[in-house]
Amino acid sequence: MSNLPIKLQRQVHFYETDAMKVVHHTNYLRYFEEGRVAWGFDRGIISLTPGADITHLAVLDIRARYLKPLIFADKFEITVQAKLERLRLTFQYRLIRDGVVTTVGESVHVPLGEDLKLKPWNETVKNIFRSEAWTETWL
């Protein structure tokens, strides 16, 4: 487990593009989610262990700024950082191709229990965030 932003390598698949081979704007939200899930596994917040304490993350807000298009077969990196402010968990995303930022985004989440009601973060999660690195604001 690291407290540095997650960096996930990815390549654009054909089915993610339109007729001009440009990534469709909705697929960027999928890239954000892939990064967020990788972050959660790395930090131990997401577990596939049966009987694990389950916390669902409800999306309150999501934004994306498209700076340069990604094209079919482009190789790019998804960088994710996160911070906790009370119950709100904010993720920021940066997609980088050949050293150039193509997209930045942000999503804000709150924790819900199995009953879909707000659930306070446990001490383990709070401790993870105490050491989490938030390098800068990207959006």
Image (tube, helix red, strand yellow):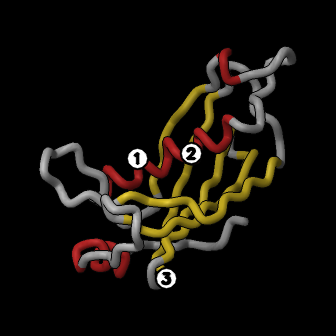
Residue 9 placement, left or right of 30? left
Q: Position of residue 39 (x, y in %)?
A: 41, 53
Relative vertical location of residue 51 with respect to residue 74 in this rendering, above or below: below
Residue 38, labelled with which disc? 1
Earlier in the chain: of badge 1 and badge 3, it is 1
Q: Nearer the viewer, residue 4 or 92?
A: 92
Q: Residue at x 49, y 71 (%)?
A: 89
Q: Secondary structure at mark 1?
A: helix
Relative vertical location of residue 138 with respect to residue 79 in this rendering, above or below: below
Residue 103 placement, left or right of 44? right
Relative vertical location of residue 77 with respect to residue 17 in this rendering, above or below: below
Q: Quadrant of the N terminus?
A: bottom left
The residue beneath circle 2 is: 78
Q: Residue at x 72, y 20 (%)?
A: 72
Q: CA distance from mark 2 to mark 1?
A: 10 Å
Q: Nearer the viewer, residue 124 or 60?
A: 60
Earlier in the chain: of badge 2 and badge 1, it is 1
The amino acid marked with disc number 1 is Ala
Q: Position of residue 26 (x, y in %)?
A: 71, 37
Q: Secondary structure at mark 2?
A: strand
Q: CA distance from mark 1 to mark 3?
A: 21 Å
Asked which quadrant contains residue 57, the reply is bottom left
The amino acid marked with disc number 3 is Glu
The amino acid marked with disc number 2 is Ile
Residue 85, labelled with which disc? 3
Q: Nearer the viewer, residue 29 or 51?
A: 51
Q: Are marks 2 and 1 in contact (CB under 8 Å)?
A: yes
Q: Quadrant of the C terminus?
A: bottom right
Q: Residue at x 24, y 49 (%)?
A: 47
Q: Secondary structure at mark 3?
A: strand
Give the class, few, some or many, for how many residues have Cα within 10 Å of label 3's Cα (few <14, many ≥20). few
Q: Nearer the viewer, mark 1 or mark 3?
A: 3
